[in-house]
Image (cartoon, rainbow, N blue to C red):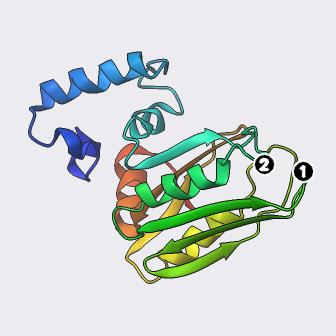
C-alpha cells in the first residue's frame, strides 16, 4: 500500500498489508465515509483522511460561537497532525462578544502564541491555519491542502519530497496552504 510506505496508518505498523486493508475498509464503514471507487477524483484523499493522526478534513462552517470551543479543537487537531513537530498546551478561546473579537491563545513548543481569527458567522477562518504554517517553517514539514471544491477543508503535514511523490505516484495535487 503506497501510503503505508510514507508513514500513514502507523498505528497498524505491525500488521500485514492484508490486515491493514481490512482495517482500512472497516474504517470506511465505521466513520460513515462512502468507500470511493479508485477512479473518483477524491479517492486518495478519502483514504488519506482515514488516518486522523495525519489529516484534518472538516467543514469550515463549524457552528463556531462562544462556548463551542471550535478553535481549541482545531489547534489541538493541527498539533496532532504535525508529526510531532508542534507540541501544544494551554489552549484558550475567548470571545469579547457574540461576534468577537475572538482571541485564541496556546503554547506551542514552549512559546505562547496569540491568534485573532476574523469573525465570519459560524465559519472557521484562515488565521489558525496560517499560524501553524508559520510554526512549521523551521521544520522540514509544510502544511499542504487539497482543493475539495466545496466548503470543507483538507490539510496534511508533509515534507516537500512526500508531496512531490504523492503527486507523481498517485496524481494527487496537494498545494502549500492555506
Quarter of image, res 21: top left
Quarter of image, res 19: top left
Numbered badge on residue 66: 2
| Position of the N terminus by quadrant | top left
Q: Please, what secondary structure does the residue beneath circle 1 have?
A: loop
Q: Is residue 46 shown above or below 11?
A: above
Q: Are marks 1 and 2 in contact (CB under 8 Å)?
A: yes
Q: Is residue 76 shown above or below 12?
A: below
Which residue occupies 37% across, 48% down? 53
Residue 178 visible within the image:
no
> Looking at this view, is 158 or 70 the one in front?
70
Q: Is residue 174 shown above or below 137?
A: above
Q: How crowded is the residue under tag 1: few (<14 C-alpha within 10 Å), some, or many (20+)? A: few
Which residue occupies 46% across, 31% down? 43
Where residue 51 sits in the image (x, y, percent)?
36, 40
**Left or right of 26: which side holds 96?**
right
> Looking at this view, is 31 or 90 the one in front?
90
> Looking at this view, is 71 or 18 the one in front?
71
Q: How many discs mark residues in the rendered view?
A: 2
Residue 46 visible within the image:
yes
Quarter of image, res 57: top right
Numbered badge on residue 98: 1
Between the C-alphas of marks 1 and 2, the distance is: 7 Å
Q: Please, what secondary structure does the residue beneath circle 2 have?
A: loop
Which residue occupies 46% across, 26% down? 39
Q: Is residue 170 shown above or below 75?
A: above
**Left or right of 149: which side holds 31?**
left
Q: How crowded is the residue under tag 2: few (<14 C-alpha within 10 Å), some, or many (20+)? A: some
**Left or right of 159: which side holds 146?**
right
Where residue 93 sits in the image (x, y, percent)?
69, 59
Where residue 123 sits in the image (x, y, percent)?
78, 46
Where residue 88 sits in the image (x, y, percent)?
46, 66
Amino acid at each position: 500500500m503506497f501510503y503505508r510506505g510514507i508513514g500513514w496508518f502507523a498505528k497498524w505498523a505491525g500488521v500485514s498489508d492484508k490486515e491493514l486493508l481490512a482495517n482500512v475498509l472497516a474504517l470506511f464503514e465505521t466513520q460513515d465515509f462512502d468507500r470511493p471507487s479508485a477512479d473518483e477524483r477524491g479517492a486518495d484523499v478519502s483514504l488519506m483522511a482515514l488516518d486522523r493522526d495525519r489529516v484534518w478534513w472538516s467543514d469550515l462552517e463549524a457552528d463556531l460561537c462562544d462556548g463551542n470551543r471550535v478553535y481549541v479543537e482545531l489547534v489541538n487537531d493541527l498539533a496532532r497532525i504535525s508529526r510531532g513537530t508542534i507540541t501544544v498546551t494551554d489552549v484558550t478561546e475567548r470571545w469579547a462578544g457574540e461576534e468577537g473579537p475572538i482571541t485564541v491563545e496556546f503554547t506551542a513548543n514552549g512559546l505562547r502564541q496569540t491568534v485573532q481569527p476574523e469573525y465570519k458567522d459560524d465559519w472557521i477562518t484562515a488565521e489558525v491555519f496560517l499560524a501553524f504554517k508559520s510554526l512549521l517553517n523551521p521544520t522540514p514539514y509544510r502544511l499542504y491542502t487539497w482543493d475539495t471544491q466545496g466548503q470543507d477543508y483538507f490539510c496534511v503535514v508533509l515534507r516537500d519530497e512526500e508531496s512531490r511523490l504523492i503527486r507523481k505516484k498517485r496524481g494527487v495535487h496537494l498545494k502549500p496552504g492555506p
